[in-house]
Amino acid sequence: MKELEYDVVVIGGGAAGMAAALECRKNGLQTVIVEREEHLGGILLQCIHNGFGLQEFRQELTGPEFAEEFIRQIRDSDISVLLGTTVIDLVSDATGKEVFCYSPEYGLVKFNARAVVLAMGCRERNRGNIRIPGTRPAGVYTAGLAQRLVNIEGYIPGKDVVVVGSGDIGLIMARRMTWVGSKVHAVIEIQPYPSGLTRNIVQCLNDFEIPLYLSHVVSRIEGKERVEKVEVTPLVNGIPDADKAFEIPCDTLLLSVGLIPENELSKKAGIELSPQTGGALVDSTMMTSVPGIFSCGNVLHVHDLVDYVAEEARRTGSYVASYLKGKQPQRQVRIKAGANVKYVNPGMFNPDKPDKLYLRTLIVKNNARLEVKLDNRVVKSVKKNHVQPSEMISVKFSARDVADMQPTSDSVMEVSVQ
């Protein structure tokens, strides 16, 4: 087994992994990226639509263009990169971290590291996760797989399409399938509001007159060899109304029904996970419950903008450097999700070095107000013109916001939306 020594091993070569690695190297740490695919860039490489980079690079880019900006920086640095290499185990003890990998080119590899950054991204939920009844014909794809088939492999999955779920990937693929000449008959959404960004609803559905059925479910898939039709049932107060069910003939069903952080490796390492996000629980420095192992990007919690991923990953890289230099927070306050908030990340707050919080709401509301309380005293209040579960909210703290904070060991910070 080949053994290599590094200060930091970054697992994952997407936007999060590259941004974190660059920040680690900027702080003088010997860093390696381990990526199981044959190219850096992750999911960005198949996202050929624009809308990326408005915050990170102050220009509108496609996914591959966004990735190339980071890939160029990696190439210009002395960061090591192992492509086509899969991490199979992560062991941590008081002496350091051991990362075990294999690949056709390098064989078995063991990395000895002082710290590890988890940046493995997320995966799609599939038909098994949502349990749609019916037969098991060909023609059922996740939206991300269909995106790869069209944009990278050059295949058209089908001609008559129904999309389940109004998540951003599903909306973008509804437009993409229309562009390649397929007929998208409908997008079916179980919630009474869309799951994707408002701009994608407008640009991907409204502009192409694709119907969006809110509070509806695909209640059955029919077909012998290939999908022939789906049954769609409306929900009334959350209960299916079978009397009003209708059928849509189609040969393809695309599922855009949510993303799950890719945390199997985290579980093997004994890292505590959040039941709300499926990602690791992290403190104010993005460190997990296992000292020296950090997490960022979509493996931590699913982001709606890759710009947020890069921003969070850079901060994580700087925290890794501080940790390895022995600089740890003297005070950390536990954060909890209050009224109408699904989760808040990170789960701890450092009043001596205030930073951003990321959260998702449970409600759709105009003219909302976000409140942050410390021990039931409001320390920050922000007006939001519009909030909805599909759009992540970021809250930045200034030194002024925390100037008079005097938390105790029992203090709790609560974030709510009213």
Image (cartoon, rainbow, N blue to C red):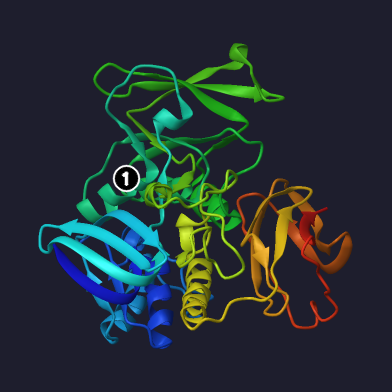
Q: Mark 1 Cα within 10 Å, few/some/many (few <14, many 20+)?
A: some
Circle 1 SS class: helix
> What kind of residue is marked 1?
Leu
Is 74 placed above or below 166 here? Answer: below
In the rendered image, which residue does mark 1 sit on?
Answer: 145
Percent coordinates x, y for residue 234 in the rendering: 61, 23
Position of 378 compared to 80: left or right?
right
Residue 162 at x, y = what percent?
Answer: 42, 33
In this orientation, which residue lies closer to the viewer: 294 or 75?
A: 294
Residue drawn at x 48%, y 48% as measured from the top left = 171
Q: Can I make out residue 36 in this image?
A: no
Which quarter of the rendered picture does the N terminus lie within? bottom left
Compare residues 337 and 229 and report the one nearer the observer: 337
**Residue at the extreme top of the image, as rendered:** 243
Q: Report whether 142 appears left or right of 209.
A: left
Q: Relative to 145, say whether 332 is above or below.
A: below
- Quarter of the figure with residue 360: bottom right
